[in-house]
Image (cartoon, helix red, strand yellow):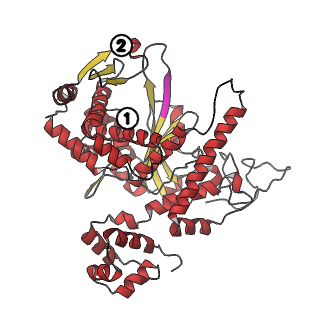
Amino acid sequence: MAGTARFGRRLRQLRDRVGLTQVALAQRLGISPSYLNLMEHDRRPLPAAVLVKLAQEFDVDVRTFGGGAEARLASDLTEVFGDPLFDALKVPADEIQELAQQAPTAAAAVVHLFHAWEAARASANAMAERALEPGESGGIDPVRLSSEQVSDLLQKHMNHFPPLEEAAESLRRDARLSDEELFVGLARHLERAYGVRVQIDTVQNMRGALRRFDPATKTLVLSEVLRRGSRNFQLAHQAALLTVPALLDHVAADPVLTSDESRRLARIALASYFASAVVMPYDAFLAAAEAERYDVDLLGHRFRTSFEQVAHRLTTLRRRGREGIPFHMVRVDIAGNISKKFSATAVRFPRFSGLCPLWDVHAAFLRPGFIRVQISKLQDGSRWFSVARTVRKHRGGYHARNVLQAIGLGCALEDAHRLVYADGIDLQNTAAAIPVGMTCRLCERMDCEARAFPPVQKPLSIDENVLGMSFYAPVGGAKDP
């Protein structure tokens, strides 16, 4: 069965989960036990008719068999083995793929171990650059590890949590919230249901905080610097912590989170998800997004939210039968650090290194506040349409720091016509697509002026007498696709 997708392991996992023997499952699917046995051992493909039957009988999401998690794991492993640490081993791509397919738990453990080692290496380098004062301690940054685990949790659930959506809808219904008076409605609900009083206070009194809740006095204080939409969001966030704490704990109990730090961070991320669902209710938001052709700024005005909050909400529209466009999203700072990433597409953002500098999310810093669009082509031939814009975080007065970040939002090129940003762009002219990669160490394009590091897939050949496009680019060879 070389070259075909392997679903046997996932089929066995499903059968074990529902507690059926091969004979019993075969009867439910209308096939012979011997054929089921062959499928479970990847000696026969999984027919579409059987996949449909699985979905009907066991309410299985067909994406479970789509290899999305497996592809992400293989991408992570490729990045791990692309580190210079493994240069001498030259681990073949087919072995990496086989490890992800046949031993996903072990593969995930390799990624986790490398992540811990990477954090330890970064910590050691930081300590080496400065002399530690007496009593100062160093070590692995647990928050860095924890934030990646939270990203894994969101990716595992495709950034869609139906129980939180339902809880947010219940809150809006029970509290009789209206979009025009959302702040007043949320404040009234918190006081009636939990005895919580909401106050607005000065920057000086908040001492750097934007939201502070005192359980003893049941007082929720918001900073005066928060705009109307942000105040709504923070009220909804606190409502999540008070309304559905058990649900937050239940989702955060996922085994992908291995520490108290990661579970606490997950609760914060899930409470923010709940807040987005309150401020931008699923059905109304999806209808508006489709009607306005995913105009992020216009949606922000309508729901009184920021560009980033709208972009993030667009990635959560994965309700079965009522899906929006599958998007990937990334947030970077001016130094190229990735601080937020999610993908509902086949784009796999790097976990351990920087994103290719040819993505338009980096160029957004050249014209802050302006929308940039780009058609990109990955080396596998896939083409993508992306939108990028800077977002400014200014929390205070004249002396407050003005932090600039950029948001990148993208989808498959075939979906681009549904976006207002594609107006006036020849989507059929794929020759104009910008060749991009994910990160230099994994990109095989050698004729790239932006290359910062050599690729792991090709030997490094240097001629001191010839200068190419970059230090690592060969001269006189065939042009990369």
Q: What residue is shown at x 29% (from left), y 17% (from top)?
A: 200
In magenta segment, residue 253: no
Q: Quadrant of the C terminus?
A: bottom right
Q: Amino acid at mark 2?
A: Thr
Is residue 286 visible from the viewing direction of this image? no
Q: Nearer the viewer, residue 436 or 228?
A: 228
How far apart marks 2 and 1 lie (CA) works out to: 25 Å
Q: Nearer the viewer, residue 237 or 295?
A: 237
Q: Residue furthest right?
A: 465
Q: Which residue is mark 2?
A: 202
Please determine whether, in this image, residue 274 is positioned above or below residue 446.
Answer: above
Query: Is tag 2's residue or tag 1's residue first in the polypeptide sequence?
Result: 2
Label 2 element class: loop
Q: Amino acid at mark 1?
A: Phe
Residue 307: numbered disc: 1
Q: Magenta region, mostly helix, strand or loop?
A: loop
Q: How many discs appear?
A: 2
Q: Nearer the viewer, residue 306 or 144?
A: 144
Range of magenta residues: 395-405
Where's residue 304, x and y in %? 28, 31
Label 1 element class: helix
Q: Is residue 172 left or right of residue 328?
A: left
Q: What residue is shown at x 66% (from left), y 50% (from top)?
A: 448
Please determine whether, in this image, residue 236 is positioned above or below residue 33.
Answer: above
Q: Is residue 413 left or right of residue 218?
A: right
